[in-house]
Every structure is written in structure tokens, then in C-alpha cells.
Amino acid sequence: MRAVVLERNKMVSRRLQRYFLAAGIDPILVEDPKEVAAAAAGVDLIAADTFDGDLVAATIRQHPRLRALLWTAEPLKRSLRYMVENSSMSNVLGRKDFESTPRPWELMLILKRLVDGTQVPPIGAYLDWGFQGYQEKVGTTAGRDASVAHIQSFINRLQVPKRIAEMFGELAHEMLMNAMYDAPADAQGNPKYALDRKADISLPDAEQPTLRMATDGSKLVLQLSDPFGRLQRKHVFDGLARGLAQGEMDTSHGGAGLGMMVCHNSTAAMFFDVAVGHHTEVTAVFELDLNLREFRTQAKSLHFFQA
């Protein structure tokens, strides 16, 4: 696999080169945007800061087989515009500033996924070795509430600010609502429970989502999988774009009913993995070493993969 990597900062460019090579990608490093057109012929991937999003989009129009990888030190709003308009752009990595690469663990995970998208990484791929966590199935409305309380108790034992546990409780509730009420469908593809999200439900074993919660001391990871695979790309990117533009939560039900603003406001990075008709897996990551003020202002990451 070959990639054009446009990065104006030479030090950052050299670091990116190491990561790309380590992931099995042959990078063509470019500092001048004028050199991208010539370098893009015959490559598989173009990677650049969202600052150069117009150029990336134009290059994809000229080479439709190209995939794109963006990184940004800014809020997601600008990146989302490109993602909504271009289906080849489904990954944006937040970085601290223009003198930094994206987070190495995240960059390597995404690069390896771009090389081979057939394998969905386990929860341990998001964490350092030696992490601690648990897994549970959630099948009832009462079980949902108990699961949210379990998550908050798990986080509170880490002696972190109370707001973090509250935030992840809100996130878990939203993700469980999506997986329990919006994801299940009958044989004709009609939602089974989405019409009344206030009703008490009891899901059969085959419909129950699986929740995983874990920490390595520096990150929190919440992961939820449902056995339906009905989440669509537009629900993620269009929903969040509307939310950021209007300052409102997207509550449309089109297949998953994600409260994308809750996801965005509670995480450093969100990962969506969909095997159409088989499963949807949503992974949320929060960095514990950031104080809440830094967290609110940091650039966020968003990733969508579909098989």
C-alpha cells in the first residue's frame, strides 16, 4: 500500500513517516501542496491536515479509488463538512497542535485498519497491556439502568473527577438506548422497539447487546456491540454535522438513533465498526490524563468502518 502524506512541518512529517512505514504503508512525503497532484498517481491513500481538505477532496475527484485520512488540531466541524460530502473520507484524527502528530496508538490502529480492514480490533487494542475491565449482556430496561450505575461505580473507583463518571454514564445510557431500542429489527427490516423509547422492554438473548468497559489507568474505553448491523454512515456524519451546526442533539431514528452530540461531548475519539446485517460495534475513548478544560478544547477523532 502506498500513500501521499502532505504535512508542512518537517519534524512532524518525519515522525509520520515512521508510523506509516511501521504499519506497512510506503509513504510519499510532500510539503508543498502543489506536488500532490503528481504524487497521487498510483497510490492508495492520501493523508493530510483538514486545513488542506479542499485539496484532498479535489485529488479524490481526480482519482476516485483513493481513500483519505485527515488529522486536525481544530474542532471537528470543518472536518465533518468534508466527510459528509465525500464518502472516501471516513477517518479524522485529532492532534494536540500543528507541531504534533496524532496520538500514536490511534494513528497506528487506523493505519493498520486501512491496510487490512477485515479484522475488527478487540477492546485491548485501544488500551495498554495489563488493562482491567468487564463485559456484560444487557437485555432489559432495568438492566440498562443497572449497567449505567455499574459503569459509574467502576470509574469512581479510579479517583477521578466525579464529572467523568457522570459523563460516561450519560454516554452509556445513550449507546444502550441505541443498541436496545433502535437497532433491533424484524425480518423485513422494520424497527421493533424504536417507536416507543420510553417503554420497558425485555430482549431475547439473540437481540441483546454486549457492553464492555475497561481502563488501563490512562484511558477509559466503553464499547457496545449489537447483532444487527443497521447503522449507516450518514447517521454518524450527517447527524453530528447537524448537531454541531445547530447546537442540538440529533434524535432522528434512521436505523440507530444515535445522540451524536452526547458521543462527541463525552469522548476524545469515537470508532464505529459496521458489518451490514451482522453487527454494529461502537467504541468510545476518553483520556484520563487530560483535565476537563483541556478535554473540552482538544481536537476530537471520529472513525467509521464498514464491511
Image (spheres, helix red, strand yellow):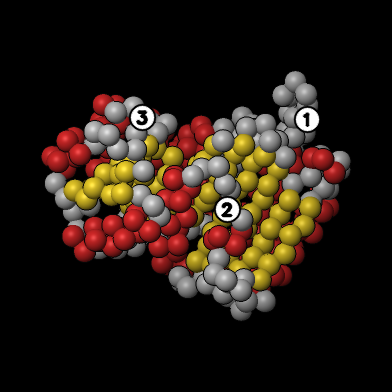
Q: The disc labelled 2 sits on which kind of residue?
A: Pro
Camera sees residue 163: no
> Circle 3: is it few (<14), some (14-19), or many (20+) Cα within 10 Å?
few
The residue lying at 82 percent from left, 54 percent from top is 143
> Mark 3 touching mark 1, by CB under 8 A?
no
Quadrant in which the N terminus appears: top left
Other-residue count near label 2 (Cα within 10 Å), few / some / many at <14 / 14–19 / ≥20:
few
| Of labels 3 and 1, the one closer to you | 3
Q: Is residue 10 above or below residue 224?
A: below
Q: CA distance from mark 3 to mark 1?
A: 38 Å
Q: Measured from the top left, where is residue 272 in percent x and y?
A: 55, 44
Label whose residue precedes the other's in the sequence (1 or 2): 2
Provide the secondary structure element on which disc 3 rests: loop
Of the image marks 3 and 1, the number of the one nearer the N terminus: 3
What element does badge 1 sit on? loop
Q: Residue at x 21, y 64 (%)?
A: 11
Task: Indicate the position of residue 269 as horizontal and vertical percent values.
Answer: 49, 55
Q: Amino acid at mark 3?
A: Arg
Q: Nearer the viewer, residue 221 or 155?
A: 221
In this view, the mark in front (1 or 2): 2
Which is more N-terminal, label 3 or label 2? 3
Say above or below: 185 vs 246: above
- Identify the residue at image location x=36%, y=29%: 65
Where does residue 208 sit, x and y in percent of width and height? 79, 44
Q: In the rendered structure, are the residues bearing label 2 and label 3 in contact, judged by CB atoms less than 8 Å apart?
A: no
Q: Say the numbered circle drawn on residue 65.
A: 3
Between the C-alphas of marks 2 and 3, the distance is 25 Å
Which residue is labeled 2 in the image? 121
* Residue to which mark 1 is pinned: 192
Q: Could you tell me if residue 4 is visible in this image?
A: yes
Point out the residue furthest to the top here.
188
